[in-house]
Amino acid sequence: MSYNLLKGKKGIIFGALDERSIAWRTALRCHEEGAELVLSNAPVAMRMGEINKLAEIVNAPVIACDVSSNEDVTNLITKTMEHFGGGVDFILHSIGMSINVRKGKHYTEIDYGFNAKSLDISAMSLHRVLATAMKLDAINDWGSVVALTYIAAQRVFPDYNEMADAKALLESVSRSFGYHYGVKKHVRVNTISQSPVKTTAGSGVKGFDGFLEYAEKMSPLGNASADDCANYCVMMFSDMTKMVTMQNLFHDGGFSFTGVTEAVINKM
Ligand SMILES: NC(=O)c1ccc[n+]([C@@H]2O[C@H](COP(=O)([O-])OP(=O)(O)OC[C@H]3O[C@@H](n4cnc5c(N)ncnc54)[C@H](O)[C@@H]3O)[C@@H](O)[C@H]2O)c1
């Protein structure tokens, strides 16, 4: 059902790889709610071609951008402003990549070169996008930026590896930049800390299926799905949440504040 919550709003959605992606689900919901979109992903992800299916459904151009490249980010933001004839009202940062996980390196033995790249893609890219947008005045007054994160930034999930550090950095950038963009242009910046979801990035975590089931049993409402997350993003991009900024918002069916559940005890 559509409530026209984003009617007249324009936004950039990063990170739709395939139809399981949280960004994909969010693009569909934003479109249903009346937003006009630009879609973006890394050139390597584009080659898989799936994003063009989404682009057709939501009637949006696709602009390639490796978020670790200043040049790519500047090009994306410039082309987006040309496309819309002005700035955007919202941005979804739905990007994660751990090179050490990919290479099978244990947290205690990570390669620091890979680590620098992982932190750059997964966390500092939010800074790069915001700094470029600020320089080009690409986000309209009272705009809203959301980045997706995970509770491993606060608590230890051993197999989440260096991504735990990346998410802690991402949340910090969101707060720090949220301050500066808020003062300058009333732009709000938040992170949504989402339940586990079986996507390409999610499945990269070792033992993901067992972990998904554990989270389900540890959450009074169960795990929040990618579609639930899309609804929350719509709310965060809408004018209903104008005064919310610099927050890490848990969207996890209650997992983050649950000590233990009967379902977990019964399993012991
Ligand atoms: N799936 C989960 O369990 C879960 C839980 C909490 C948070 N998150 C976060 O949600 C976000 C989206 O992940 P997802 O689960 O939808 O998986 P996904 O694999 O569908 O999305 C990750 C995206 O990051 C993109 N990406 C990687 N390197 C890039 C680069 N250099 N430049 C531009 N884009 C790049 C990929 O192409 C992909 O589209 C990530 O930040 C992830 O950490 C996921």
Image: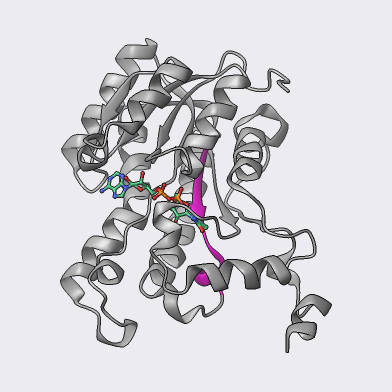
Please say which color scheme the image uses: one colour
Towards the viewer: 11 or 201: 201
Place residue 14 in its image quadrant.
Answer: top left
Residue at x-position 45% and y-position 59%: 202
Place residue 151 in its image quadrant.
Answer: bottom right
Residue 150 rendering spot, x and y as whole percentages: 53, 62
21 lies above or below 235: below
Towards the viewer: 78 or 222: 222
Towards the viewer: 31 or 206: 206
Dividing the image into 4 quarters, which one contains the C terminus? bottom right
Towards the viewer: 92 or 227: 227
257 lies above or below 196: below
Place residue 186 in its image quadrant.
Answer: top right
Q: Is residue 19 visible?
A: yes
Q: Report whether 112 appears left or right of 131.
A: left
Q: Residue furthest top?
A: 85
Q: Report whether 90 appears left or right of 52.
A: right
Q: Residue furthest right?
A: 262
Residue 164 rendering spot, x and y as whole percentages: 44, 71
Residue at x-position 61% and y-position 54%: 247
Q: Is residue 187 visible?
A: no
Residue at x-position 66% and y-position 53%: 224
Residue at x-position 54% and y-position 55%: 197
Dividing the image into 4 quarters, which one contains the N terminus? top right
Q: Which residues are magenta?
A: 145-154
215 within the magenta span: no
